[in-house]
Amino acid sequence: MTLHSDAVRVLEGYGDQQGLRGVYLDHLREHPDGMWKDCADGHVTASALVIDPEGERVLLTLHRKLRMWLQMGGHCERTDPTLATAALREATEESGIPGLRLLRDEPVRLDRHHTPCAWHLDVQYAALAPRGAVEAISDESLDLRWFAYHEVADVADESVVRLLEAARARL
């Protein structure tokens, strides 16, 4: 199975956000290269909201290029076997936390947004940090910080707030 076919499988099985889900599936039907950064019409990305083991805080990154507090995530790589593993890889790389595990293998939500490189069709997951986890800033971050749930709306945009709400509903 290719990453492209896994993305189609995941999206076909995703039961929420029917309109946006259709946009993603249409994109993948029209673009065999729609998983990759070099697809100028946009590409599927994978991200994960990192939640502390007590389920009270989330780890956000102050993105170096966008200068916004966001969940961990980014472009899929040709070595990623699935969207879920791409999201977990991105979360691990950007948080510096080994031992993260996805809350579930299916996405929490979808979010389409324009970035300097193209449209990102982001497939968003939630990941739980292990007890005693210590974060480490990557080259893609200006800062990493744990935020209590009630603090997220004060620092992040609506897409992160919606992701947090969806993740909390699945805890």
Image: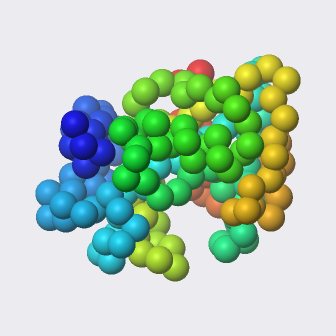
Q: Above or below — where is 11 with respect to 53?
A: below
Residue 133 pos. (x, y %): 81, 29
Q: How many marks?
A: 0
Q: Above or below — where is 30 with respect to 80?
A: below
Residue 156 seen in render: no
The quarter in which the C terminus is drawn is top right
Residue 80 seen in render: yes
The residue sitting at 74% across, 56% down in the picture is 138
| Drawn side of residue 41 relative to residue 104, left or right | left
| Drawn side of residue 41 relative to residue 55, left or right | left
The residue sitting at 80% across, 64% down in the picture is 142
Residue 93 pos. (x, y %): 65, 47
**Quadrant assignment, res 109:** top left
Q: Nearer the viewer, residue 37 or 107?
A: 37
| Drawn side of residue 104 relative to residue 156, left or right | left
Q: Nearer the viewer, residue 99 or 47?
A: 99
Which residue of the protein is positioned furthest toward the front in this rendering? 79
**Quadrant assignment, res 155:** bottom right
Residue 43 pos. (x, y %): 35, 63
The residue sitting at 21% across, 52% down in the picture is 25
Q: Nearer the viewer, residue 147 or 46?
A: 46
| Drawn side of residue 151 relative to residue 46, left or right | right
**Quadrant assignment, res 69:** bottom right
The quarter in which the N terminus is drawn is top left
The residue sitting at 72% across, 45% down in the picture is 95
